[in-house]
Image: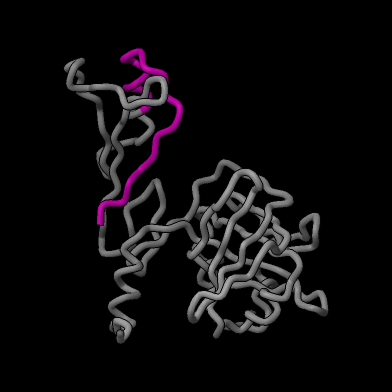
Amino acid sequence: MKADVFDPRALREAFGAFPTAVTVITASDPAGRPVGFTANSFTSVSLDPPLLLVCVAKTARDYPAMTAAEHFAINILSEAQKDVSIKFARPAEDRFAAVDWARGPNGCPIFAQVAAWFECSMHDVIEAGDHVMMVGRVTAFESSGLNGLGYARGGYFTPGANSSAAGGEIGAVAVLERHGALFPLDDQNLALPSYSAGSGDPKTLASQLEQLGLSVHDWFCLLDL
């Protein structure tokens, strides 16, 4: 049976409907020089053992060095690091010169002011069409608590601002959870406060919930494209 043939651009745009984090994958080449590139095809895989993966195009300039490395790092960019994402998405001779970075425990470049970073040993390299999946076993990590930079439909967005992609709007709503299950709001006749970008300080959502006597743990914004 003949395989389905799709227009690559249309397929890429469809994949881009899924909002993702923005990362820079880094490693060292055989001479010890830092290499890296921007990637949003990143995901966690397992907690036990601690595994993650990132997809690397076989046409990437640093593909040979990256896939041969014994260790690599994932730098999850913070919302203030759009310029870093753009810099590492373009070919340049010394992209690291303009970035504040240091070597991780296993020598991988770790950026300052990222939302989180993970240094990994190479667990597996899996063939996947015109890409490979690099599966890494986490050997060290750190989370700063900063908001991450997001990407969808060819544009960047952050949790605290309007999207630069297609003029989307960001909003926030609250969901109650009790003992691992969603709380039945209809049975309680409750109406929870919500927040939309441009309507005021998003922190007021948390304060309104606290005034209702509810304990606030985590809340987040969703991009409405």
189 or 132, nearer to the observer: 132
* Looking at the image, residue 147 lies above or below residue 18: above
* Looking at the image, residue 177 lies above or below residue 45: above
Q: What is the magenta range?
A: 206-225
x, y percentage for residue 77?
A: 55, 57
Q: Quadrant of residue 124?
A: bottom right
x, y percentage for residue 136?
A: 65, 60
Q: Which residue shows up at 51% across the image and 71% down it?
A: 86
Q: Which residue shows up at 31% across the image and 72% down it?
A: 13
Q: Which residue shows up at 70% across the image and 56% down it?
A: 119
Q: Quadrant of residue 178?
A: top left
Tell me the colour scheme of the image.
one colour
Q: Is residue 111 left or right of residue 170?
A: right
Q: Quadrant of residue 70?
A: bottom right
Number of marks present in the image shown: 0
* Looking at the image, residue 173 lies above or below residue 16: above
64 or 224, nearer to the observer: 64
x, y percentage for residue 198?
A: 27, 44
Q: Farthest front residue?
A: 1
State which quarter of the image contains the N terminus: bottom left
x, y percentage for residue 26?
A: 66, 67
Q: Which residue shows up at 31% across the image and 31% down it?
A: 174
State which quarter of the image contains the C terminus: bottom left
Q: Farthest right residue?
A: 31
Q: Is residue 192 left or right of residue 40?
A: left
Q: Is residue 222 magenta?
A: yes
